[in-house]
Amino acid sequence: MTTVTHVRLEHHEPGRLGIGEARPRISWHIVDAPADFAPHGAEIRVSRTLRGTTTESTHALDGSDQVLVDWPAAPLASREAVAVSVRVSDGEKWSDWSDAVTAEAGLLQADDWKAVPVGSADDPGEGPHRRPERVRREFTLDGPVTRARAYVTAHGVIELELNGQRVGDEELTPGWTSYTHRLRYATFDVTDQLRAGANCAGAWLGDGWWRGRLGFAGGLRDIYGDALGAIVQLEVELEDGTVQTIVTDSEWQAGSGPILMSDLYDGERYDAREEDAGWSTAGFDASEWSPVAVRDAGTPEMVAPSGPPLRVVETLSPVEVMDRGDGRFLLDFGQNHSGRLRIKASGPEGHTIRLRHAEVLVDGELCTEPLRTAEVTDEITLAGEDVDWSPRFTIHGYRFAEVSGWVGDLTPGDVVSEVIHSDMERLGWFATSDERIARLHENVVWSLRGNFVDIPTDCPQRDERLGWTGDIQVFAPTATFLYGVTGLLSSWLQDLAAEQDELDWVPPYVPYIEIPPFDAMTHDPLAVWGDVASLTPLVLFERTGDLALLRRQYESAKAWLASVEANAGDDRICADTEQLGDWLDPNAPAEDPTKAMTDRYLVATAYFAWAARRLSQTAAHLGEEADAERYAALADEVAAAYADRYISADGTVDGDSQTGYALTEAFDLWPSPEIREKGTTRLAALVDEADGRVSTGFAGTPVVTDALSRTGHLAEAYRMLECEEAPSWLYAVKNGGTTIWERWDSLKPDGTVNAGDMTSFNHYALGSIADWMHRVVAGIEAVEPGWKRIRFAPRPGGDLTSASATHVTPYGTASISWTLSDGEVHVSATVPVGATAVMDLPDGTVTELGHGTHEATFALTADGAL
Ligand code: BGC
């Protein structure tokens, strides 16, 4: 029976409190509809509650929209709660009403905020690690509580307690935004944590991104300020209808707690002897606490989250415990990930247990060189009592941990690892008969998880962890398939636009902080990296149908292209600019990843043409016809200049590198079909000569297999995919990698870690091949924005005997699977209601598909090739 499910508001998880949209757009899935069902209008029922009064309205919608449909009712007021259900009609019969999705508006007006930042009045002092303070306040509520909310943010990171109990399950609140422009807040339902009479609020603070160490080569501290501040606004509705508001202000007290230091890179030190039980309960003796100082709030916009919070999303137990004697144990969690340890320990008073972390072992011990200067060490000093402890405000990237100072046996369950990242909805899966390739895909998933830590970071372990623009630019197509990343990236792109506006430059990482050596950069437009401004909003639109996001980023996208255009000059070649080029091409010397085989200006000019082409498409989606024409003409001009400068009549692309050919093909830069034929044949020959080994870096890797598979060289694309020799994707898999490595040979064939000061085992950029695996190996891709139309085009090859992929599209679940047996390939594909599809098989059959599941079969040619 036709049923409406998966109702969502914007990109929020169901039940989200404190959303920032007064007119949240609505999406839903339709399932179990008969084959002849055609959506013919919908009704949206909105139940809204403000200050105890609930009203309901129903809104009729014509047509068949079901993705990000405009809010049909009056805008939400600050704090207004909504429950939204949907039913659909086929023109005759209505479905049942869906389950309601709930949400609640946050503080939508700047003057809703009364809380100000408060912290210790003591001089924070100098020195690498300063003890973070806690703040508290007791207050009386005049009657029973019917509803209470806590709006929470900080200068630093914060965890709130009410009456001795932790509030919510979010980690590292408020995450990292460009704090000078946008400060995000979190909203919690605290109704059950408050009561009539005496109450107490207490907040833990940590350095976080505000004043902790950021950047390499020692990095910088105090980037946003040297003082911490809690910003808490409690709004409590009482049974008699009155509202009591308790906010951080000069009435609060500050005191130090058991956290002696807390840093994202270096870890946390905790002294259990300094615990003062009851500090966040009423009646506690706070005579040693002092009045707080009220801090300058600055002028950032207070923003609600558009993506999910950080949470502990999974707990891993060690797969191996290695006893090294003297209370020292090495633990293998079997999976590289981001998170922290949780320990259940006991020992004498004053005894210290130390936790260290690393991604790999060398000679049976933690290899910490790749962490560079990040200490990544947590310590607890015991008070003589049993503890169940984990650090509060730090996060590490590791597979292995060393526990030292342990007293007695370490049994499974004593130490577990809490996996922490942005709590995104899983949307995509891939499977195949070749276990090595399935593991490669799993490694991509884990690298995404390890690096979506509120912002899209480059790596989760060393003294970096920055929002590098190039990394997410190349990985966004893969990321959008695997997880619901749009809310998170939407926030990050707003930070990017804010920074770009201020700097008149798209910085190489966002949030931008002036750390050496990047403070000395020329501010030339950096191809591949800065291109995130124009390319990524369009990718997000294509994968989600979010036109408002595309519109919101349009000025930023245009400003980016304008800067490239101005820099390139009249000849349209991006010469003489600072460029990172085909970063980490495996042929470049280990110490200079920019010295790639492919000319960096070729890469930049190819990207210039592509950014203009894609911006023209963006403009067309937005109805900006004049812009669309202008950018298309610019793209043509740049493509012609590129061909003139870099492509010979015999199809040779300057430098004769895999990346040069791949970019030329992927960005449609060939001057003629004949030259294209010659050039792509040369690419295939290069791959054959290399026995399938990869010689591409960040620029070429995302496009090289596509360039082969779409020009009749599928066999070479599979040859690359199945190659196990370095450099290749499976080299890392063969060598035990559980995430995607930064370098093709982060671990060298002789078992040593690639020297140099840049070797991470968890960088997602080279995992951008997974997008090709979804689209070409399994054979599923969106061909109209938001997956309104799907193309199933499986291209079996290599030694694979099956592959499948599933994606929860904005319309519902779409999937494909194929199996090869006895020379025949059997395909099964599912189209969600509301979408249409085309099945395009290698034997030339093209079939239109409506919703539902469809089967097809095609034969391999006699020689086994397709
Ligand atoms: C980061 C990269 C980044 C690159 C660019 C590295 O340190 O980890 O992933 O894109 O620098 O310079």
Image: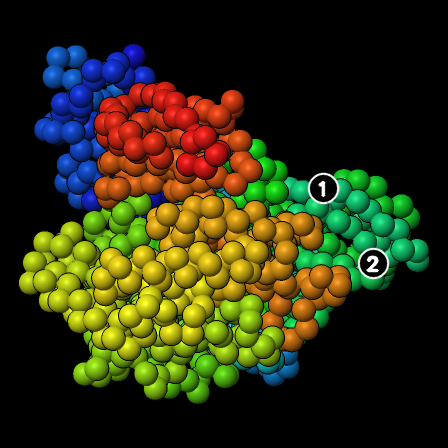
Residue 645 appears in the picture as rendered: yes
Q: Is mark 2 within 8 Å of ligand 1?
A: no
Q: Amino acid at mark 2?
A: Gly
Between 90 and 858, the one nearer to me in the picture:
858
Q: Amino acid at mark 1?
A: Ser
Indicate which disc, 1 or 2, sits on the residue closer to the N terminus.
Answer: 1
Q: Quadrant of residue 846?
A: top left
| Residue shown at the point (38%, 74%) measured from the top left | 654
Q: Quadrant of the C terminus?
A: top left
Left or right of 323: which side holds 489?
Answer: left
Q: What secondary structure is found at the residue carrying circle 1?
A: loop
Q: How busy is the neighbourhood of tag 1: few (under 14 within 10 Å), some, or many (20 plus)?
A: some
Residue 855 image offset from top left, x and y in percent: 36, 20
Q: CA distance from mark 1 to mark 2?
A: 20 Å
Q: Is mark 1 within 8 Å of ligand 1?
A: no
Q: Which mark is residue 364?
A: 2
Q: What secondary structure is found at the residue carrying circle 2?
A: loop
Q: Which mark is residue 317?
A: 1
| Residue shown at the point (72%, 58%) measured from the top left | 360
Q: Quadrant of residue 267?
A: bottom right
Residue 571 image offset from top left, x and y in percent: 21, 82
